[in-house]
Image (tube, coloured by chain):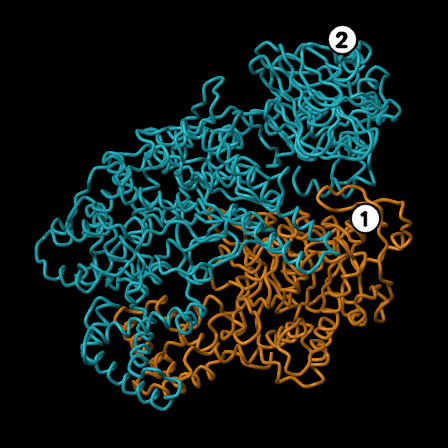
Chain colours: A orange, B cyan
C-alpha cells in the first residue's frame, strides 16, 4: 500500500491546519495530539488475523440476476447437441423438466492454461492464468432475493451481517480515513441494503454505499460554500468538546466521538480523491474501457475499487446491475451478451491492473452471482433460476490461478464432483484472509454467530 | 419441503426419476401426524367415477353411491399406461376420475376420527395443486408428474364435521380418482400376508433387535440421527437423512446402503458389517415391499428435563420477598431501592456519587420520560421550586405528558421489532400497522396494566370488550402477532414455519426473556427448553390465522380483521362486493374501448379522437372508483384459524420431516399446562394466562428490568432479552425481586415503577463518580453514580426539531403509502420509500428490508429482530451527517432565527442558545468563545458575500451547527 495511510505525522499536519483555521485556542494542538494516545481503542484498528493469510483485502464483485454457468465458464458439449427433444432441469418456480436449450456462445481456451471460457468473456479469457474458476458452487434457494442474501450473509432467509462486515469486524481496516467496507452500488441489488449491512455487528462495520456521481457517499459534500466556515465550526466544537471531556475524566466514548469528527472531516477530501479517476493515465483508463471524464459505469466501479484497495480499504464490493436490470434472462438468453459486454473488459482490466502493480498477490478478487441458470428452456428462449450448481471465480490473494475446481454433470444440472456450497465459498474467502471461519464469532442474543453458521469447509485444493 | 430439499429434488429428478418420486411420495405420505393409537378399521372406499370395485380386498362403492356429493366433471382415459403398474381393479378406478373444481363432500359420516387417503393420477401434462381436508391444507404444491403417474396420497387425519368430510384441491387441474377412509388412525399399509409375516418375524425382526435397537429405538438413550427402527412408521419416515427404507427400491433405501458399507459416511452397524446372508435378507425384505407388522408407531421421550434442578437457576426461581437491607449510611437512602443499592456499594467498599445538580437532573428526567429536552421555562420553574417534592412534581408532569407514551412506546416497539412493512422479498407495506403502533403509545400513556397489555397482544381478538371501541382496540393489539416477519415471494409453499418461528422467538424474548427459537431444530443447548416445548407452542400459532399482507405472487391483502360491529359486517361486505362488481364493470368498459380503438384503424381522426376521449373518461372513472377509501377499516391482526390442531415436531427444524405430534401446552419448566381435550380454539388466551400465572416469575422480572434498563442505560440483568444461561446474571438479584414483587403488587403499573425508580436517590446521583469506583467498577454495575448516556437516534432528531420550533405534534395516523389496488411490488422492484415528516421519530415509516437512512446511521432499532438494548456506536458517518446533512443545516437555521428573534444582542442570544440546547447558561469564557467565533464567522461570510443570503442568520446558523455537534448536546449527565 503506497498512499495515504493514517500515520501520526499526517494526523499532526491535519490538526495544524485545523487549528490554524480556527485560531481559537493556542493550547489546543498539544491537547489534541495527546489524545492520539487513545488511538488504540479504535474499533477499526487493524487486528491480527488467526494465522498468516495471503490476502489482505477483498474486491467482491456480485453480478445480479443469476449468470448462466453453461453459457460462460462451464463448458457442456452435451448441451451443444441439444436437439429440441431431450429434456432436463427446466427452472421456473415448478422446476419441471423442459426441453434442453443450446448455449449461444462458443467456448475457447484462454491463457497458457487453456481454461475454457465462452465468447461472452473474450477479455477475461486472456486472464485465465490468474483465475481459478469454481464450477460446482451451490446454494439453498432458487429465488433472487434469498439466494442473494445467502451469498452475502450465509443466511437465506434472515438478515445477518454481510461478509464484508464480518471481514471488517475480523481484521479492522488499514486506513482510518475511509470506511473499512465500501459497496460500490450505483443501483440497489436484490434484498436491498441488507446485502451490505452490519446487522448485529457494531455499526462501524456497516458497508458504506457509494453511488457515484457528485456525492458518491451520503453527506460527503460540504453544504456551505463559504471556505473556512466548516473548519471554524469544527474548531469551536473541538474546543468545547475537549473541555467537556476534561471535566469528565477520560471517557473513551467521548474522545472517540471527538475523533470521529476528525475522520469525517478528512473523509470529505480523502474519499473524493479516491473516487477521482481523472488522476489515472490514458493507458489505465483504456484498460478499464473508460473514456476520460467518465465517472460512472462498471469500468468506473472497477477502477475505483483498485484505488480503494490501494488506500487500504479492507472489503470492497461491486454491485453489477440491479434488482431490475440484470442477468435474469428468462425470455432470451441472447441478452446475456449485453451484460457480459458491460463487465468483461473492466473485470479483465482490474485483474491485469492489480497484477502489474504488484497488488494482486495480496488482493483477493472474487466474482460471483446468486445462482446459475437451467439447462432446460424457460420462456421463449431463456433459462430459469438454478441454485443447484453454478460458476464463479477468484483471482489473486493466495488462490491458485490457471485451474478449474469442481464439475457438474453432462448438462450442468447438478454438481458431479467437489461441490462448493455457499458456506464453503465463504469459509475459503475468510481462510485466504487468515481467518478461521469457525473462530470468527460474535455473541448476539444469547448465541455465538458465525458467517458460516454451523457449516463451511475450506476448499484447500484451490489454495496456492 | 425446504428450499434446499426442493432444489436438490428438482435438480436430481431428471436423473433419478423413480427414486425421487418414491421419496417424494413417502415424504408426503408421512406429512401428517402419527399418533400411538390402535390401527384403524376400513370405513369406506369410493370410486369417484365408475362402478363399485374391490381394492386390497375391500369393497368400494361406485360413483352411484349416496354417500358423497360432487359437482366436478367426470373423465376417463383407460388407455394410458399407469406408472407404476398396478392391479386391474385399481387401475380401472384410477383411470376414471373427476376434475374441474375438485370438491368432494363425503356424507353420512358418523362423528369421530378418520384417516383419509386420496388416489390421484395424471393423464397428460404435469399439474401443481394443493389438497385440503376439511378446510385445512394437508399437502402443498403437489406435482402430479408425467402422463400415467399415480399416487395414493395420505394418510391425513381428520374428524367428521356435521356428518361430513370435505376433500378439495386448489391450483392446477387435479384428477381425483378415489377416496379411501379408515376409522381412527391408519398408516395406509395393506394387511401383511402370512408368508411375509413369517419371513419378517424369523429373519428381520431378530436382526433389527440385535443389531440396531440399541441406538435406534424408543428405548435408546438418545436415538442416533433421530432414527427409530422399532416400528413401521418410524422406519419409513426415517431420521435426519431421510427414509430408512423405500419399499421395493433396494438401491434407493438408506438402510441397505448403510449395511452394505457402500459409502464412507454411513456404515451400519458401526462396529462391524453384517454377514452376507443377513444383508441379503434385508435386501429381499425391501424388495418385496418391506412388509412390517409393527403398526404402532413408537416415539422417543426426548431430552428429559430435571424440572426441580432447572428451576434452581436464578431466573426461574420464584420471586422472593427480599428483606430490605440495612445500610451504614442510613441518611442516604430516599427509598427502599437505595437500601439495596447502597448495601451493595458498601459491601464493595464504594460510596455513592453526590446528587446531580438540578439542571442535569431535569434534563435527564425529561429525556428519560419523554425523549425531548426540557424547555428553558421548565428548567426555570424547577430551579425556583425549593420544596422537597419539586422533583416528584416534575416526574408527575412528565408522566402525564402525551410525549411519555411516544418515548416508552418506542421502547416496546424496539422489543417487538416494529416495522410498517412485512419483510417478504418485496417488503409489502402494511398501511394498517400504524394502528398497533398507536395502540402501544396509548396503552403506555394510559398506564394500561402490564398483564392486560400482555393479554391484549396475545389474545385481544378473543377477549371481546365492554364496548365496541374496546373490542376493536383489543383486536388491534394482536397486531403484535400479525407483525411477525414474512418471507420469500411464493404463495403455495409459503414458509409459514419461519413466520411462526419469528412469533415464538419474539414472544420468548419479549415476555419471558427466553430464547425459544433455539429449540426449533433441537433441544435447547443451554436452557431447559425442548423441541417438544417449541412445537407445543408452535401448535398454538399454527392454529392462528395470520393476515396476508401481500407478497410477490399474491399481491392483495386478505384475512385482515374488520374493525366494525359484527352485525354490520354482512351488510358492509355486501356493499363491498357490489363495489367490486362495479369495479369489474368499469374495468371491462376500459378494455372494451381499448379494443375498439385498436380495431378502429380505418376510422377517421375525429372518430378516433372521440374514442380516445371516451377511453380516457372510462379510465378516470375506473381509477377513481378503485381509489375510494375502503368501506370499513381493518386491522393487521390475527384470529383463530378455522381449524385448531396440535403440531408435529419438525425433525431438525425441517417442516418436510414431521415427527410426533405434541399437545399444545406451555413450557414444561414453567408448569407445562395443557389445553383441554378437544379444545377448538388456538389456545392463545390460555397462553397469556400461563405466561402471567403467579407461578411464573419471568414476565415481572423481565419487564421491571426493561424499565430499569431504560432509566439507567443498563439493566440489573444486562441482557434484557435473555434471562437464560447464555445471558448475564443480575447485579442486584434482591433488588430485581423487590421490584418484580412491587410491580405485581402494584397492579402491574408501569408508571408506578417510574415513580419509584426516579424518586430514588440512586437515580438522582450525578455522573461524577469517585476515582476508586471508576477503576474498580468501570462498567458501573454497582451504581456508584449515574452512567453518562448518549441520546438515542429518535431523541437526537426530535430535539433538533423541537428546538427548531417545527416539531409537528398533531396525531400521526397512517403513512402516505400508495393505494393498495396499485401495488405491484416484486423482489425486482420491492417497495422502497422514505416519507419525510416533521413528526416525532417514532412516527417515521420504518421498513423491514431497507433501513431508514437516518435510523441506520444512529443505531436505530433492528426492524427485523427484537432489540432489547440499543448499541451506541460512534462512526464517521454520524459525524458526516452532523456536518453536512441538509436537515441539520435547516434546523440550525431555524434555531438561529429563533434565538435572534428572542434577544437583541450576541450575549443574550448565546445564553438562549445554551438554554435551549444544553439546558444551562454559558460560562464566561464560553461567551468569549462565542463572541470570537461570531466575529470570525462574519468575516468569512463577508468575504463570500455572493454565497450568503443573510449574514447574521448564517453566522448564527454556523454557531448552532457547532453546538449540535457537541458531546454535551448528545450526552446526558
Left or right: residue B482 compared with residue B277: left
Q: Position of residue B557 (x, y in %)?
A: 53, 41
Q: Are marks 1 and 2 in contact (CB under 8 Å)?
A: no
Left or right: residue B449 compared with residue B179: left
**Is A413 or B735 nearer to us in this picture?**
A413
Q: Position of residue B881 (x, y in %)?
A: 42, 69
Q: Position of residue A390 (x, y in %)?
A: 75, 54
- Chain letter of disc 1 in the image: A
Left or right: residue B202 compared with residue A174: right
The residue that mark 2 highlights is B59
Whether discs 1 and 2 lie on one chain: the answer is no
Q: Residue at x 71, y 53 (%)?
A: B598
Viewport quadrant of the C terminus of chain B: bottom left
Q: Which mark is residue B191?
A: none
Is the residue A117 above or below the residue B757 in the image?
A: below
**Is A233 or B266 nearer to us in this picture?**
A233
Q: Quadrant of residue A168?
A: bottom right
Q: Position of residue B539 (x, y in %)?
A: 52, 29
Question: In what element is the residue under mark 2?
Answer: strand
- Chain letter of disc 2 in the image: B
The residue that mark 1 highlights is A376
Left or right: residue B696 compared with residue A76: left
Q: Quadrant of residue A188?
A: bottom right
In three-dimensional space, the C-alpha distance between marks 1 and 2, rounded to whole angstroms, equals 46 Å
**Is A131 or A97 nearer to us in this picture?**
A97
Is the residue B891 above or below the residue A269 in the image?
A: above
Amino acid at each position: 500500500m503506497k498512499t495515504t495511510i493514517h500515520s501520526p505525522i499526517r494526523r499532526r499536519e491535519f490538526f495544524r491546519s485545523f487549528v490554524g483555521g480556527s485560531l481559537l485556542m493556542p493550547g489546543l494542538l498539544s491537547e489534541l495530539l495527546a489524545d492520539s494516545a487513545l488511538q488504540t481503542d479504535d474499533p477499526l484498528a487493524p487486528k491480527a488475523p488467526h494465522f498468516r493469510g495471503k490476502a489482505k483485502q477483498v474486491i467482491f464483485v456480485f453480478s445480479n440476476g443469476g449468470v448462466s454457468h453453461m453459457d460462460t465458464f462451464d463448458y457442456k458439449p452435451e448441451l451443444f447437441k441439444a436437439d429440441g427433444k431431450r429434456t432436463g432441469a427446466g427452472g421456473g418456480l415448478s422446476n419441471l423438466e423442459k426441453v434442453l436449450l443450446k448455449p449461444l456462445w462458443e467456448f475457447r481456451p484462454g491463457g497458457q492454461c487453456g481454461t475454457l471460457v465462452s465468447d461472452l468473456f473474450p477479455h477475461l479469457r486472456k486472464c485465465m492464468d490468474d483465475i481459478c474458476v469454481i464450477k460446482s458452487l451451490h446454494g439453498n434457494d432458487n429465488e433472487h432475493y434469498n439466494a442473494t442474501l445467502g451469498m452475502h450473509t450465509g443466511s437465506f432467509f434472515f438478515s445477518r451481517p454481510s461478509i464484508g462486515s464480518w471481514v471488517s469486524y475480523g481484521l479492522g481496516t488499514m486506513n482510518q480515513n475511509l470506511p473499512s467496507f465500501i459497496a460500490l452500488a450505483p443501483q440497489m441489488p436484490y434484498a436491498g441494503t441488507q446485502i451490505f449491512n452490519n446487522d448485529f455487528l457494531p455499526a462501524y462495520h456497516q458497508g458504506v454505499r457509494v453511488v457515484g456521481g457528485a456525492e458518491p457517499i451520503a453527506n460527503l459534500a460540504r453544504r456551505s460554500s463559504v471556505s473556512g466556515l466548516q473548519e471554524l465550526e469544527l474548531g469551536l466544537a473541538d474546543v468545547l468538546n475537549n473541555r467537556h471531556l476534561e471535566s469528565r475524566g477520560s471517557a473513551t466514548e467521548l474522545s472517540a466521538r471527538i475523533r470521529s469528527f476528525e475522520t469525517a472531516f478528512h473523509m470529505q477530501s480523502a474519499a473524493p480523491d479516491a473516487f477521482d479517476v481523472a488522476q489515472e493515465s490514458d493507458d489505465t483508463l483504456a484498460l478499464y474501457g473508460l473514456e476520460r471524464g467518465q465517472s460512472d459505469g462498471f469500468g468506473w466501479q472497477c477502477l475505483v475499487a483498485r484505488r480503494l484497495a490501494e488506500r487500504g480499504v479492507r472489503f470492497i464490493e461491486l454491485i453489477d446491475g440491479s434488482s431490475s436490470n440484470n442477468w435474469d434472462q428468462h425470455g432470451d438468453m441472447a441478452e446475456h451478451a449485453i451484460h457480459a459486454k458491460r463487465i468483461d473488459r473492466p473485470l479483465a482490466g482490474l485483474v491485469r491492473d492489480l497484477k502489474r502493480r504488484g497488488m494482486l498477490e495480496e488482493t483477493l478478487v472474487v466474482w460471483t452471482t446468486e445462482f446459475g441458470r437451467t439447462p432446460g428452456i424457460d420462456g421463449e428462449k431463456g433459462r430459469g433460476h438454478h441454485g443447484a450448481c453454478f460458476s464463479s471465480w477468484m483471482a489473486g490473494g493466495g488462490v491458485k490461478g490457471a485451474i478449474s475446481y469442481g464439475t457438474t454433470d453432462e448438462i450442468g444440472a447438478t454438481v458431479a464432483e467437489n461441490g462448493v456450497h455457499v458456506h464453503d465459498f465463504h469459509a475459503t474467502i475468510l481462510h485466504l484472509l487468515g481467518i478461521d471461519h469457525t473462530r470468527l464469532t460474535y455473541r448476539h442474543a444469547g448465541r455465538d454467530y458465525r458467517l458460516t453458521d454451523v457449516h463451511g469447509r475450506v476448499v484447500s485444493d484451490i489454495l496456492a | 419441503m425446504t428450499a434446499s430439499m426442493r432444489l436438490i429434488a428438482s435438480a436430481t429428478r431428471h436423473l433419478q426419476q423413480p427414486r425421487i418420486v418414491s421419496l417424494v411420495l413417502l415424504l408426503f405420505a408421512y406429512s401428517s401426524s402419527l399418533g400411538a393409537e390402535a390401527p384403524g378399521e376400513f370405513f369406506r372406499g369410493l370410486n369417484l367415477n365408475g362402478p363399485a370395485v374391490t381394492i386390497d380386498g375391500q369393497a368400494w362403492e361406485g360413483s352411484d353411491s349416496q354417500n358423497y356429493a360432487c359437482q366436478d366433471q367426470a373423465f376417463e382415459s383407460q388407455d394410458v399406461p399407469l406408472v407404476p403398474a398396478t392391479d386391474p381393479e385399481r387401475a380401472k378406478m384410477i383411470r376414471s376420475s373427476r376434475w374441474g373444481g375438485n370438491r368432494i363432500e363425503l356424507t353420512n359420516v358418523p362423528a369421530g376420527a378418520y384417516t383419509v387417503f386420496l388416489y390421484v393420477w395424471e393423464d397428460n401434462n404435469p399439474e401443481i395443486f394443493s389438497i385440503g381436508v376439511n378446510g385445512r391444507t394437508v399437502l402443498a404444491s403437489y406435482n402430479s408428474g408425467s402422463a400415467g403417474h399415480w399416487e395414493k396420497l395420505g394418510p391425513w387425519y381428520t374428524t367428521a364435521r356435521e356428518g361430513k368430510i370435505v376433500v378439495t384441491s386448489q391450483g392446477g387441474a387435479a384428477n381425483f380418482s378415489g377416496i379411501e377412509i379408515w376409522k381412527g388412525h391408519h398408516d395406509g399399509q395393506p394387511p401383511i400376508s402370512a408368508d411375509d409375516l413369517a419371513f419378517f418375524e424369523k429373519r428381520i425382526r431378530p436382526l433389527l433387535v440385535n443389531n440396531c435397537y440399541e441406538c435406534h429405538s424408543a428405548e435408546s438413550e438418545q436415538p442416533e440421527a433421530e432414527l427409530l427402527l422399532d416400528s413401521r412408521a418410524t422406519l419409513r419416515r426415517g431420521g435426519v437423512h431421510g427414509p430408512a427404507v423405500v419399499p421395493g427400491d433396494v438401491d434407493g433405501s438408506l438402510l441397505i446402503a448403510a449395511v452394505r458399507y457402500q459409502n464412507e459416511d454411513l456404515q451400519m452397524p458401526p462396529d462391524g458389517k453384517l454377514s452376507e446372508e443377513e444383508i441379503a435378507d434385508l435386501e429381499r425384505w425391501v424388495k418385496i415391499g418391506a412388509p412390517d407388522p409393527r403398526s404402532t408407531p413408537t416415539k422417543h421421550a426426548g431430552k428429559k428435563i430435571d424440572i426441580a434442578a432447572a428451576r434452581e437457576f436464578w431466573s426461574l426461581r420464584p420471586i422472593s420477598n427480599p428483606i430490605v437491607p440495612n445500610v451504614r449510611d442510613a441518611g442516604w437512602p430516599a427509598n427502599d431501592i437505595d437500601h439495596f443499592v447502597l448495601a451493595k456499594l458498601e459491601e464493595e467498599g464504594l460510596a455513592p456519587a453526590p446528587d446531580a445538580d438540578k439542571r442535569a437532573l431535569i434534563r435527564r428526567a425529561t429525556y428519560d420520560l419523554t425523549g425531548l429536552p426540557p424547555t428553558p421555562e421548565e428548567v426555570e420553574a424547577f430551579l425556583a421550586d425549593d420544596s422537597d417534592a419539586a422533583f416528584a412534581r416534575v416526574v408527575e408532569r412528565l408522566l402525564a405528558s402525551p410525549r411519555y407514551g411516544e418515548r416508552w412506546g418506542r421502547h416496546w416497539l424496539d422489543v417487538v421489532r416494529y416495522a410498517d412493512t412485512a419483510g417478504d422479498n418485496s417488503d409489502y407495506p402494511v398501511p394498517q400497522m400504524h394502528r398497533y403502533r398507536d395502540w402501544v403509545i396509548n396503552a403506555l400513556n394510559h398506564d394500561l396494566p402490564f398483564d392486560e397489555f400482555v393479554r391484549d397482544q396475545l389474545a385481544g381478538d378473543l377477549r371481546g370488550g365492554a364496548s365496541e371501541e374496546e373490542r376493536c382496540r383489543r383486536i388491534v393489539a394482536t397486531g403484535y402477532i400479525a407483525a411477525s416477519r414474512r418471507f420469500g415471494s411464493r404463495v403455495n409453499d409459503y414458509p409459514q414455519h419461519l413466520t411462526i418461528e419469528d412469533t415464538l422467538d419474539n414472544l420468548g424474548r419479549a415476555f419471558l426473556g427466553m430464547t425459544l427459537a433455539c429449540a426449533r431444530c433441537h433441544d435447547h443447548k443451554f436452557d431447559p427448553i425442548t423441541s417438544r416445548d417449541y412445537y407445543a407452542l408452535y401448535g398454538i400459532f399454527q392454529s392462528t390465522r395470520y393476515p396476508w399482507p401481500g407478497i410477490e405472487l399474491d399481491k392483495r391483502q386478505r384475512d385482515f380483521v374488520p374493525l366494525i360491529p359484527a352485525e354490520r359486517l354482512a351488510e358492509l361486505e355486501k356493499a363491498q362486493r357490489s363495489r367490486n362488481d362495479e369495479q369489474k364493470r368499469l374495468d371491462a368498459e376500459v378494455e372494451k374501448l381499448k379494443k375498439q380503438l385498436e380495431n378502429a384503424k380505418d376510422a377517421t381522426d375525429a372518430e378516433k379522437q372521440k374514442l380516445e376521449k371516451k377511453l380516457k373518461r372510462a379510465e378516470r372513472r375506473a381509477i377513481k372508483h378503485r381509489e375510494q377509501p375502503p368501506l370499513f377499516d381493518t386491522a393487521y391482526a390475527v384470529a383463530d384459524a378455522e381449524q385448531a390442531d396440535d403440531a408435529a415436531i419438525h425433525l431438525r427444524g425441517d417442516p418436510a420431516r414431521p415427527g410426533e405430534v405434541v399437545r399444545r401446552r406451555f413450557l414444561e419448566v414453567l408448569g407445562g399446562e395443557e389445553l383441554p381435550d378437544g379444545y377448538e380454539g388456538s389456545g392463545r388466551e390460555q397462553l397469556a394466562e400461563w405466561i402471567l400465572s403467579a407461578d411464573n416469575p419471568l414476565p415481572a422480572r423481565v419487564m421491571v428490568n426493561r424499565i430499569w434498563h431504560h432509566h439507567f442505560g443498563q439493566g440489573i440483568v444486562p441482557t434484557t432479552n435473555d434471562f437464560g444461561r447464555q445471558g448475564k446474571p443480575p447485579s442486584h438479584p434482591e433488588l430485581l425481586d423487590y421490584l418484580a414483587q412491587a410491580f405485581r403488587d402494584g397492579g402491574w403499573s408501569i408508571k408506578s415503577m417510574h415513580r419509584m425508580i426516579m424518586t430514588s436517590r440512586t437515580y438522582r446521583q450525578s455522573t461524577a463518580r469517585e476515582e476508586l469506583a471508576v477503576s474498580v467498577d468501570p462498567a458501573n454495575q454497582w451504581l456508584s453514580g449515574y452512567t453518562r448516556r448518549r441520546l438515542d437516534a429518535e431523541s437526537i432528531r426530535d430535539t433538533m426539531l423541537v428546538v427548531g420550533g417545527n416539531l409537528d405534534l398533531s396525531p400521526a395516523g397512517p403513512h402516505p403509502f400508495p393505494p393498495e389496488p396499485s401495488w405491484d411490488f416484486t423482489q425486482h422492484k420491492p417497495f422502497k420509500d422514505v416519507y419525510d415528516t416533521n413528526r416525532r421519530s417514532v412516527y417515521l415509516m420504518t421498513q423491514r428490508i431497507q433501513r431508514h437512512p437516518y435510523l441506520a446511521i444512529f443505531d436505530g432499532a433492528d426492524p427485523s429482530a427484537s432489540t432489547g438494548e440499543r448499541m451506541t456506536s460512534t462512526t464517521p458517518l454520524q459525524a458526516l451527517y452532523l456536518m453536512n446533512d441538509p436537515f441539520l443545516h435547516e434546523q440550525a437555521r431555524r434555531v438561529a432565527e429563533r434565538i435572534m428573534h428572542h434577544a437583541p444582542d450576541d450575549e443574550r442570544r448565546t445564553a438562549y442558545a445554551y438554554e435551549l440546547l444544553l439546558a444551562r447558561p454559558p460560562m464566561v469564557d464560553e461567551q468569549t468563545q462565542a463572541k470570537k467565533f461570531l466575529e470570525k464567522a462574519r468575516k468569512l461570510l463577508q468575504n463570500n458575500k455572493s454565497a450568503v443570503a443573510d449574514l447574521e442568520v448564517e453566522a448564527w446558523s454556523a454557531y448552532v451547527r457547532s453546538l449540535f455537534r457537541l458531546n454535551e448536546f448528545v450526552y446526558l449527565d
